[in-house]
Image (cartoon, rainbow, N blue to C red):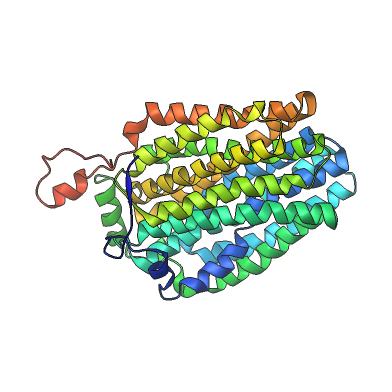
Amino acid sequence: MSYTVKSAADARPGYGRLLRTPSAWTFLLPGFAARQPFAMLTIGIVLLVEHTSGSYGTAGAVAAVTGVSMALFAPQSGKLADRYGQRAVLVPGVLAHTVSVLALLTLALAGAPLWALFLAAVPTGASVPQIGPMVRARWTTALGETSPLMPTAAAFESVTDEFTFVIGPVLTTALCAGVHPAAGLIAEAALTLAGGLLFAARRGTQPQPSRGRTAGAARGRAAATTGGRTRTSALPVPGVRVLAVAFLGIGSVFGGMQVSLTAFAEEIGEPGVNGVLYGIFAAGNMLAGIVCGAVAWKTGPRGRLLAGYTGLTLFASALWAVHSVPLLAGLGLLIGLCIAPALISGYTLVERLVPAEGRTEAFTWLTGAVALGQAAAVTVAGQLADTHGASAGFVVPLAGTALALITLFVLRSRLTVKTTGLVAARGMSHREPVAVD
């Protein structure tokens, strides 16, 4: 994979110029606080329920219900945000999430039966605010779709996501271990409420709701991107479906690592090392995201996506055989370095494949797929850790990334941008569609 380090003369500007975008900080700061649920919720549930039930399998099952619920409802939340505006979705969403989290932790501490925990886990996951996709959509509004800063914004968002995965699990683990097993979820709910309401209050930077746009203009933009067919959903785009399946693999890494690292730390009698190990894994992800935004790539996003998943599969294949903290930390760092290129490339492809009217929804299909993969991973890894130990749980990231890599390789032709409609508008409809790469 070839690239060149950016200089001042490069066509794509860097982070400094991006962060000087007018009004950017007004949605970035509250957005950072409000996107913590994705990093804190799963590990907070696992730590609390394992404490109250004594079983990683039970804890993983409750976390899985939350993840599945989020995966099912996230795209609908994105679609509503595209249509009615982000504030109209966020305000009731963050309120519902706060109440649901408090109900879940109350039931867990009271020793409620598993079915009651499942019942509370459904609205907890369904109401997780989709801040990451909403911030990405706001960058498009602030910069313009054709801005050379858009790839840098995609990289910056990946770095921000991974920074939350550095802070979130470490903070949650520290609160649960040092204060109270429920303290991690209480902090998650408080950050969601405060950050979500502040983010929703910044109306000036949110994209214009599609309901308020001129219907003809919206149809024209959608038709130009989809070859003359107006779509009401992002899911019919073949590339979105392929990416959603692939992002299940990234979710399997997050979920499998969270549960297996927790079980590994318990096995060696050092529960506090869990947050450190997961933080190193997430730090590698963040570092790779910074690099991705600081170089001018000569290869296209599809090639980088395949390379990222190849690295993920290769390094995940060794997890189950590692039994020392330093080696596991080093391997986690390498796995983290491969995740950011895959995430950034996937979001970059979505920006090219989906018209602006459905982009928030498309982003939520990807984040929902990560949540679904994470849910499946925490369930399977929890059962394996209970019956066969932490090493068995590490097989889950390998299986998830390998299946995702096979899917991407077989269906890579779907990840191309068709220019038929755009070419026809110039009177050259005889030209063939061209690939991203």
> Which quadrant of the figure has residue 69?
top right
Give the answer, above or below, for where 236 lies relative to 181. above
How many marks can you see?
0
Q: Position of residue 70 (x, y in %)?
A: 61, 46
User: Looking at the figure, which quarter contains the N terminus?
Assistant: top left
Determine the residue positioned at 76% across, 51% down. 173
Most foreground residue, 145 or 47: 47
Quick one: 113 or 218, which is closer to the camera? Answer: 113
Give the quadrant of residue 115.
Answer: top right
Q: Residue at x 26, y 56 (%)?
A: 220
**x, y percent for residue 208:** 41, 67
Q: Position of residue 425 (x, y in %)?
A: 15, 52
Q: Nearer the viewer, residue 209 or 276?
A: 276
Q: Residue furthest front?
A: 326
Q: Report the side of 384 relative to 129 (left or right).
A: right
Q: Residue furthest top?
A: 388
User: Quadrant of residue 46 in the image?
Assistant: top right
Residue drawn at the location 12% of the way across and 43% of the way down: 429
Residue 138 image point, x, y percent: 44, 64
Residue plotted at (53% across, 52% down) = 286
Could you tell whether 175 is left or right of 378 in the image?
Answer: right
- Regarding residue 126, the answer to whether it shows in the image is yes
Q: Nearer the viewer, residue 343 or 319?
A: 319
**Horizontal arrangement in the rendering, residue 134 relative to residue 16 (left or right):** right
Question: Where the C terminus falls, by quadrant?
Answer: top left
Camera sees residue 208: no
